[in-house]
Amino acid sequence: MTNFWRRLTYYGFGFLIGMLFLVFFFQNRGCSWLPSNRVKNAVLDRLVVVSESTEAQLLEKGITLKDVVEVLNDGEVDFSKSKKDGDDKVYYIEKDGVTYLFSLPYESFISEVHLGKDAKKVETSSEGFGKILRFPNDDNLVYPDSTKLVTCQQQELGLIAPKEIFAMIKSSGKIDFGKCDLSKRPKPEQYIWFTDKKGRTIGVQAIWYKNKINITRFDTEEGMVECNEDL
C-alpha cells in the first residue's frame, strides 16, 4: 500500500509539472480548453481576412500579413477590452505593443482583422474587398450545394470537383464585402470571387454550414450563371 501511494504521489507531481509546461511554456500549442486559446482557435477555424484599407495601415506600420497570423499563435487576448456579448463578437489581441481586433460575425466563415483600440466600435467591412490571409486546415472545406440549380451551374461552368474549386479559391480568392449579407438569417451570406483555370472570374455565394463553406450559387462577371435545365 505504501508503494501505491508513493507511485500516486509521483504521478500527481509529474502531472502537475506537465500542466505547468503546457500553460506557461507551450501556450497556443496545447491547452485548447484555455479561454484565450479557444478564442484564437475560433478565429483560426474561419477564413482570416484583411480589408484593403487595413492592409494599407499594416504596411505603413511595417507589419506583414505573416505577422498578423503569428498574433494568433502567441498574442495576448484581453477579454476586458473585447466585445464578448451579442451575436457579432470582436476580440482584442495584443503583441509587441500592437493591438489587433478580430471581428467574428454571427454564423459566418470569415474573421476580419482590424487595427485599433476600441472593440465596441469595430464592425466587419460592408464594402470593398478582403484578402484571405489564412484558411482552416481542412482539405474538404468547400462543397457546392446539391440543388438542381447549383449542380446545373457547375456543369455549365465545368467546375465539378469541390477540391479543385477550393484550390482555385485558395490561389486567387477574395472576399467581396459589398456582396455579403451578414444580417441575413438563419444563415449570413458571404461572397467570394476567384479565377478559374480558364482565366474566367467566378463568383460564389456561400454560407457556413457544419464548419464547411457551402456554395449556394455560381456567378460570372455578367451575373448569375444561366442554367438550361428544367428547374
Image: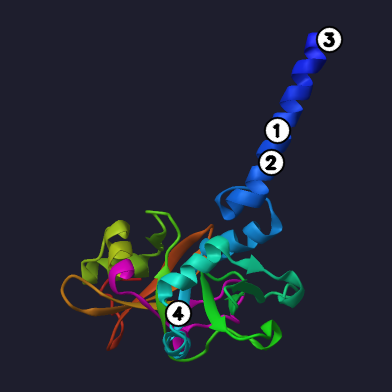
Q: Nearer the viewer, residue 157 or 131?
A: 131
Disc 4 residue type (three-letter) = Ile
Question: Where is residue 124, by image quadrant?
Answer: bottom right
Q: Which residue is mark 2?
A: 19
In-image side of 108 versus 153 (left or right): right
Q: Does residue 146 appear in the picture of this structure?
A: no
Disc 4, SS: loop
Q: Earlier in the sequence, mark 1 or mark 3?
A: 3
Residue 15 bears which disc, if any?
1
Marks 1 and 4, how far apart at CA = 39 Å
Q: Earlier in the sequence, mark 2 or mark 4?
A: 2
Does 180 appear in magenta?
Answer: yes
Residue neighbourhood size for the residue with mark 3, other residues' Cα within 10 Å, grouped as few (<14), some (14–19), many (≥20):
few
Q: Does residue 113 appear in the picture of this structure?
A: yes
User: What number of labels is visible?
Assistant: 4
Q: Nearer the viewer, residue 133 or 149?
A: 133
Q: Nearer the viewer, residue 144 or 142?
A: 142
Q: Earlier in the sequence, mark 4 or mark 3?
A: 3
What x and y, as percent, mark residue 85? 75, 74
* Label 2–label 1 contact, CB within 8 A: yes
Residue 174 bears which disc, if any?
none
Q: Which residue is mark 4?
A: 63
Image quarter of the N terminus: top right
Q: Nearer the viewer, residue 25 or 155?
A: 25
Q: Classify 13 as above or below 139.
A: above
Disc 1 residue type (three-letter) = Phe
Q: Residue furthest left?
A: 198
Q: Which residue is mark 3?
A: 2
From which residue to which does the magenta span run?
169-190
